[in-house]
Amino acid sequence: MMRYLYSLLFVFVLFSGCGKQENYVPEVVVNYNVTLTQFSLQAKNGILLVPNQGVAGLMIVRTPSGGFVAFDRCSTVNPEKKCAIVPDEGSITATDPCSGAKFLLLDGTPQKAPAEKNLKIYNISLQGNVLLNVTN
């Protein structure tokens, strides 16, 4: 009887751990700082693209309400390709050039297929009213 239970447990563990997670952007350590002055000088249309951070770079967005949000540029459509989303000119969306998927830059939600999952969002805080800190 115990042998049967152990066999059942082994099979359960085996099958529960073998599923491939699709559209999963991997965890990487992010700790990036930018002053509000640097943001204002470097951002285009309220969007700052930061290379060499996160999986495919960071995108820091100033929202219409004056706040900030930060996303990984890695598209959630086939994230293993590390395709970096690109802000759409004159819009609050960004497009994955590899798949054509679109995302809303206010909260990272998918706006056009084949996107199904939100962009990976990072914590962002304003320190001393002069420094933006992006972390995970």
Image: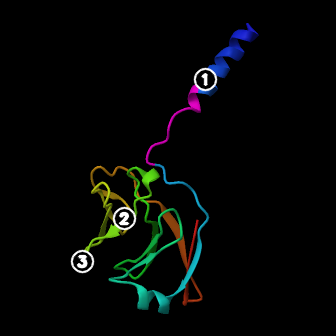
Label 3 element class: loop
Q: Residue 59's image quarter?
A: bottom left
**Residue 7, above or below 17:** above
Q: Residue 22: where, in percent of width, then height?
A: 45, 43
Is the magenta region chiefly helix, strand or loop? loop
Q: Residue 73's image quarter?
A: bottom left
* Mark 2 or mark 1, whichever is nearer to me: 2
Residue shown at 52% from the left, 71% from the top: 52
Split into 4 quadrants, where in the image is the C terminus? bottom right
Callout 1 crowding tier (Cα within 10 Å): few <14, some 14–19, many ≥20: few
Highlighted magenta segment, given as a residue range: 15-23
Split into 4 quadrants, where in the image is the N terminus? top right
> Hey, what amino acid is under mark 1?
Phe
Callout 2 crowding tier (Cα within 10 Å): few <14, some 14–19, many ≥20: many
Callout 3 crowding tier (Cα within 10 Å): few <14, some 14–19, many ≥20: few
* Mark carried by residue 12: 1
Question: Would you name the residue on which mark 3 appears?
Answer: 90
Q: Residue 19: where, in percent of width, then height?
A: 52, 34
Lateral position of residue 120 relative to residue 136, left or right: left
* Mark carried by residue 85: 2
**Residue 125, above or below 35:** above
